[in-house]
Amino acid sequence: MATTYSGLYLEIRRTLKAAGSIAADLSARELVCVSSGKTKEALFRDGSLYVPMEIEARTRELVQRHLDGEPVAYIIGEWEFYGLTLAVSPSVLIPRPDTETLVDKAVEYLRTLEACRVLDLCAGCGCVGLAIASQVPEIKIVLGDISDAALKLCSRNIWSNSFSGRVVPVRMDALENPDRRIGLFQCIVCNPPYIASGEIAGLDVSVRDYEPHLALDGGADGLEFYRAIAGKWRNALYPGGRIFFEVGIDQSIPVGRILRENGFGEIESMEDRNGVRRVVTAIRYPDI
Ligand code: GLN
């Protein structure tokens, strides 16, 4: 039987709630919007109109994909982070609310500086660097990633959020020494892969089966990127320059130690909104 847009939305919301979805209302709305090509304003405006059969069928297909574990962000191809709408694909992690803490702390620091250059290493879709750019107007940002697919998304997100000229994507491998031509930065922000290889199999299906392992796998103990970056990328910071790492649960102490062993000081860690020590920051001490 034919259904209206609001009927379809409510039914999907109920199905998703029953399946245990945490943001059933948001997910239901996004899925109906993408299958019908409507903005959320248009969806509410057209709530009492009947849904054409092919749109209803398409919506149900998308809902089924989500029920099978595929994240809504990949189904709709975009996600919100720090007030920005960003294109995402299965080549990059979906920006997480936890990562907003990394942005908060870096922004707090960068607002105390004059115009400067910031490197977002392991940028993925560019969420951290772009969120910083949106908060601190004078700075210039390089988004670095090893994946060409991620860099393409970065370019798209730079353009769609009007940051061309201030933010550039550059291919780089966080596990290797930086190319000198990228120059020096006052600040590096980095949310590297930090899940221990052996723990990936136990992650939630929506992460394990859909998100890129390249962006999750932090090696045998999850700390491989922190070691490489503290050791090799120190030279891409000016002396006195500051690094901000996002870290996984229980990693703040070992990451602090890695930084100390590699010539960093003033090491501090900060909690995210759930009380998890989520960010570790330190400055590059001058060479002696
Ligand atoms: N926070 C992510 C997760 O737990 C992992 C992010 C990362 O490895 N940088 O799924």
Image: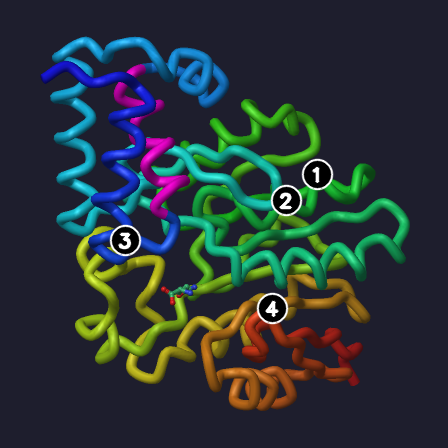
Q: Which residues are magenta?
A: 24-36
Question: Label 2, on which residue?
Answer: 131
Residue lying farthest to the left in this orientation: 1
Three-letter residue code for mark 4? Arg
Question: Label 1, on which residue?
Answer: 134
User: Is disc 1 placed on a helix, strand or loop?
Assistant: helix
Whichever of labels 2 and 4 marks the residue nearer the N terminus, that label is: 2
Label 3 CB-ligand 1 distance < 8 A: yes
Q: Tell me the crowding category of disc 4: few under 14, some 14 to 19, or many 20 or more residues within 10 angstroms, Cα based.
A: few
Query: What is the number of the mark on residue 211?
Result: 3
Whichever of labels 4 and 3 marks the residue nearer the N terminus, that label is: 3
87 or 258: nearer the eye?
A: 87
Whichever of labels 3 and 2 marks the residue nearer the N terminus, that label is: 2
Question: Label 4, on which residue?
Answer: 273
Ligand 1: quadrant of the figure: bottom left
Three-letter residue code for mark 2? Ala
| Main secondary structure along the magenta-highlighted residues | helix
- 27 lies left or right of 120: left
Label 1 CB-ligand 1 distance < 8 A: no
Separation of marks 1 and 4 at Cα, in angstroms: 21 Å
Three-letter residue code for mark 3? Glu
Three-letter residue code for mark 1? Ser
Separation of marks 2 and 4 at Cα, in angstroms: 18 Å
Separation of marks 3 and 1 at Cα, in angstroms: 26 Å
Determine whether label 3 and label 2 are within 8 Å by CB.
no
Name the colouring of the figure. Answer: rainbow
- 7 lies left or right of 146: left
